[in-house]
């Protein structure tokens, strides 16, 4: 429910409405601006008749929010959320943010080589898997804690912020120590225990869309995190599972437009997992920029033929640099800042 007060309403009138709603055990989120005083009401509002609220002096308009996701809803917050990171990096505004690095952290030498390459090409964040949830229990599972330490060490050396995937809630304190953005993988999008725990974190969360999740389910997962108090969420479209087998997944590029209509949260694209083929990444990345995504997360490897995971969908460092040049040309036309 959204309540807008009259322009000439007083603070006393505002406080009286808020007090009434809090007595109903409802949460109040003030979304007022210089132009208007407006606030959202979160919780079970089914017992309240919106017309009853017009009895309070100063109330101009009462609107029920029909979507099940309240805090993530565009109707609740009109202005885009911008995630402000260190080093002047912002996700959700005019800056097109590039996150790049290996699928798996294999060694210090490997990660440093890739970090230097993506930094030189213009990336702002270094991605790399320390914990690798894999379909097969026999596949490489990552360097775990050692990988986190290497990620932070080399990120600091190169002046890159770092992002990596968290597999379980018990690791949150460790990730808060070493990571700038905590990634929730597609398979964990509806791990509600993890989402609730991340709601108490002060770190931005990169929330990937589940393999077969609808946009509403994806936004409801964001709502779980926001309900816990953390509104620093970056949505990531990474392709969904369809009947098509030629590509690893099917990139739902229209999801960017849908999310921007439904929600104020920033949204980026992962073309690597969407395609599963390095030959498609550049064109999908250009399309992502053109459609209005706020950034990309791309897999890069110095020797993809011998990568321990996902080599087929990883760009070589030189190819990544070439792609960045092409993206910069398009970004300039669209009024976006790339690097």
Image (cartoon, grey):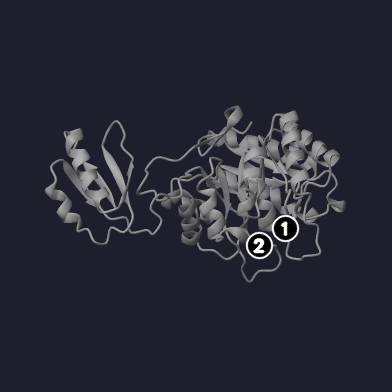
The answer to whether the residue labelled 1 contacts the one labelled 2, judged by CB atoms less than 8 Å apart, is yes
- Establish if 68 lies above or below 201: below
Determine the residue positioned at 79% across, 39% down. Answer: 114
- Would you name the residue on which mark 1 appears? 276
Determine the residue positioned at 70% across, 35% down. Answer: 325
Among numbered discs 1 and 2, the one appearing first in the sequence: 2
Frontmost residue, 333 versus 240: 240
Determine the residue positioned at 37% across, 43% down. Answer: 78
Q: Residue 209's spot in the image, x, y percent?
A: 57, 57
**Within the image, what quadrant is residue 110 found in?**
top right
- Establish if 291 lies above or below 252: above
Disc 2 is placed on an element classified as loop
Disc 1 is placed on an element classified as loop
| Visible residue check, residue 269 | yes
Frontmost residue, 2 versus 20: 20
Q: Count neighbours of disc 2 (C-alpha within 10 A) and say few if under 14, some if 14 to 19, many if 20 or more.
A: many
Q: Residue 53's spot in the image, x, y percent?
A: 17, 51
- Would you name the residue on which mark 2 appears? 249
Residue 300: assigned label: none
Q: Is residue 299 left or right of residue 302?
A: left
Alpha-carbon span between mark 1 and mark 2: 7 Å
User: Which residue occupies the extreme right position in the image?
Assistant: 306
């Amino acid at each position: 429910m959204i309540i807008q007060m009259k322009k000439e309403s007083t603070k006393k009138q505002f406080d009286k409405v808020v007090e009434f709603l809090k007595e109903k055990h409802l949460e109040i989120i003030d979304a007022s601006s210089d132009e208007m005083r407006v606030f959202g009401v979160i919780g079970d509002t089914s017992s309240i008749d919106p017309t009853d609220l017009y009895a309070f002096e100063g109330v101009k308009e009462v609107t029920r929010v029909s979507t099940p996701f309240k805090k993530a809803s565009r109707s609740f917050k009109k202005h885009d959320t911008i995630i402000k990171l260190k080093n002047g990096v912002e996700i959700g505004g005019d800056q097109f943010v590039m996150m790049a690095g290996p699928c798996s952290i294999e060694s210090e030498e490997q990660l440093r080589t890739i970090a230097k390459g993506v930094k030189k090409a213009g990336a702002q964040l270094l991605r790399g898997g320390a914990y690798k949830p894999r379909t097969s229990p026999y596949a490489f599972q990552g360097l775990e804690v050692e990988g986190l330490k290497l990620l932070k060490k080399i990120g600091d050396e190169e002046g890159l912020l770092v992002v990596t995937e968290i597999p379980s809630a018990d690791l949150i304190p460790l990730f808060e120590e070493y990571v700038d953005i905590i990634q929730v993988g597609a398979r964990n999008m509806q791990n509600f225990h993890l989402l609730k725990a991340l709601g108490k974190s002060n770190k931005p969360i990169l929330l990937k869309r589940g393999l077969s999740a609808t946009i509403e389910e994806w936004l409801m997962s964001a709502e779980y995190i926001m309900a816990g108090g953390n509104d620093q969420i970056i949505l990531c479209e990474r392709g969904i599972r369809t009947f098509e087998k030629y590509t690893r997944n099917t990139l739902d590029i229209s999801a960017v437009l849908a999310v921007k209509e439904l929600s104020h949260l920033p949204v980026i694209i992962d073309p690597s997992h969407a395609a599963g083929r390095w030959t498609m990444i550049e064109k999908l990345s250009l399309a992502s920029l053109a459609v209005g995504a706020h950034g990309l997360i791309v897999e890069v490897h110095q020797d993809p033929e011998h990568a321990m995971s996902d080599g087929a969908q990883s760009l070589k460092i030189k190819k990544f640099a070439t792609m960045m040049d092409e993206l910069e040309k398009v970004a300039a036309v669209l009024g976006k800042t790339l690097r």
